[in-house]
Amino acid sequence: MNLQDTYNKEIAPKLMSDLGINNIMAVPRLKKVVINMGVGEAAIDKKYLESAKSDLTAIAGQQAIITYARKSVASFKIREGWPMGCKATLRGKRMFDFIERLVNVAIPRERDFRGLNPKSFDEQGNYNLGIKEQIIFPEINYDNIDKIRGMDICINISANNKTDALALLQALNFPFRN
């Protein structure tokens, strides 16, 4: 049974009783996951961007898109409109598959991992985490990477506050530190 079925059959009813919610539609749920990889070296050489895009496409399971600089920064030698990174937005089945791989496979492979920070929620209840190496994902072939890159993962949750969002992620087995 995959994570989406587990959420619908077990986690949502449990959260409904634990949080004291009467309506099943008011239970916190995952809306989307955005994976962002900034590639600062893309200003110098475009091949770094293509390599990062292929890595992110393999991790996300769908085609990543290239993001562009919004404004020029002279000290970084960046012009407005230059490609500076890539991102992928996951929803539905791909989102649940990614969360399952992230929690069960990738995060345990992270070096010197002591747990996720439970204070990384914003005011709307969304959770943000950073990963230092893309090689913790099994989809990445270690022999074919040109550079170790980090990525930002933003998990968008339909919760009204931080405590409800934390309860959802704990029910999804996110390894938070104490």
Image: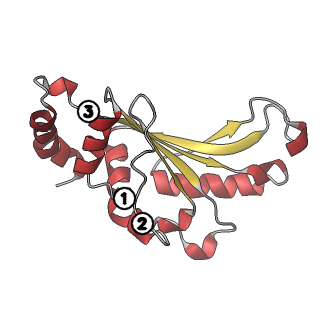
- The percent coordinates of residue 81 (x first, y second) are 78, 32
Find numbered disc 3 in the image and state the secondary structure of the residue it sits on. Answer: loop
Sooner in the amino-acid sequence: mark 2 or mark 1:
2
Q: Is residue 165 left or right of residue 44?
A: left
Write down the residue under mark 3. 28
Find numbered disc 2 in the image and state the secondary structure of the residue it sits on. Answer: loop
What is the C-alpha distance between the residues marked 3 and 1?
21 Å
Q: Give the quarter of the figure containing the N terminus.
A: bottom left
Name the residue nearer the viewer: 6 or 152: 152
Write down the residue under mark 2. 114
- The percent coordinates of residue 126 (x first, y second) are 41, 36
Q: Give the quarter of the figure containing the C terminus.
A: bottom left
Write down the residue under mark 1. 177
Q: Residue furthest front?
A: 178
Q: Is residue 125 left or right of residue 74?
A: left
Three-letter residue code for mark 3: Pro
Name the residue at 30% across, 46% down.
Answer: 169
Sooner in the amino-acid sequence: mark 2 or mark 3:
3
Q: Residue furthest bottom?
A: 143
Three-letter residue code for mark 1: Arg
Q: Is residue 40 left or right of residue 58?
A: right
Count of number-bearing discs:
3
Name the residue at 66% across, 38% down.
Answer: 67
Three-letter residue code for mark 2: Arg
- The percent coordinates of residue 157 (x first, y second) are 35, 34
What is the C-alpha distance between the residues marked 2 and 1?
7 Å
What is the C-alpha distance between the residues marked 2 and 3?
26 Å
